[in-house]
Image (cartoon, rainbow, N blue to C red):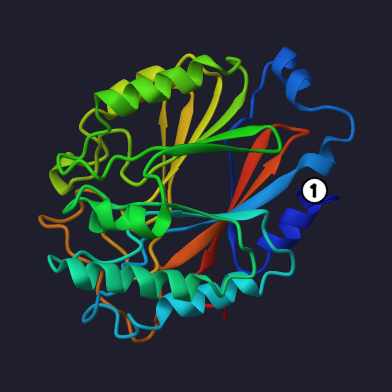
Amino acid sequence: MSGFDRRDFMKLAGLGGVVFASGLSGLAAPAQKAWATEGAAQDDFFFVQMSDSHWGFSGPPNPDAHGTLQKAVAAVNSLERQPDFIVFTGDLTHTTDDDKERRRRMGEFRDIVSALKVKTVHFMAGEHDASLDRGAAYQEFFGKLNYTFDHKGVHFIVLDNVSDPTGSVGAAQLAWLKADLAQLDKEAPIVVLTHRPLFDLYPQWDWATRDGAAVIDALMPHEYVTVFYGHIHQEHHHMTGHIPHHAAKSLIFPQPAPGSQPKRTPVPWDPAAPYRGLGWRTVGAHRNDAQYTIAEHPAIKA
């Protein structure tokens, strides 16, 4: 997106978002020089993160369960500037034991998001999409469970911590990750996209990755890593050493804060403030000062 800069992003964020600066701040001078070059504003970009639409869910606490996703798509389409791409961090559909119904939901989800103006959408699975059949149906509709892509000097890594029903990344994928990282400079900017948190946020509620510590250990030697994930249905920010982790809101219902109540039950619908706690975010990558600017947006355009 030629000419997109921080001022443009702040204008975009003013559409109802809450701005949070994160990611690659505090770069040492050599890395700053390596990443930020003359005319780097031309290489600035932003993307949208959407997550946890649970298509196929019905009933409390969202009386508009069959309409929220479409309204979120419309809200993203209404952005004055369209993002370079969109990432969808899992639980595209709601779980079902019926293989035929699972595929029907995935087909419907795919048809709904095909209305997005931006046609470059990077999907990843959530446990609702993939844990019952190890991602077989998901891969028929959306492709690989783990992969990488690059955009304007940033290396993106999509990790699968859901198709294994134990909630693990697994030895084979960990070896794949290490081989990928070995090809990168230690000061290369890296974004990791995954569904479950890679750290032990609240294992009692399945808010963890069983072998997440091994993933973080593999990432630690790299100076400029940022993780974006879903699963917990709320905005959350956490640091493991120098690595920031940012959870996204859901498009179906919010969940309570980690450990704030005895059981993990969805936050009730508030008729006085419908869609409260639901949303998506824009993430601006600013190469001149090596930061990401995160802006939270409500699921439904006002």
Side of 64 where 186 appears, left or right? right
Q: Quadrant of residue 160?
A: top left
Side of 292 where 198 appears, left or right? left
Q: Is residue 166 above or below residue 118?
A: above
Side of 12 where 215 appears, left or right? left
Q: Amino acid at mark 1?
A: Asp
Q: Residue at x 59, y 63 (%)?
A: 17
Image location (x, y in percent) of residue 141: 38, 60
Q: Quadrant of residue 186?
A: top right
Q: Residue furthest front?
A: 140
User: What is the total number of numbered labels drawn onto the structure image?
Assistant: 1
Image location (x, y in percent) of residue 3: 85, 50
Q: Is residue 80 above or below residue 248?
A: below
Q: Quadrant of residue 140?
A: bottom left
Q: Is residue 27 visible?
A: yes
Residue denoted by label 1:
5
Q: Residue at x 68, y 69 (%)?
A: 79
- In-front residue for pair 119/192: 119
Q: Is residue 253 visible?
A: no
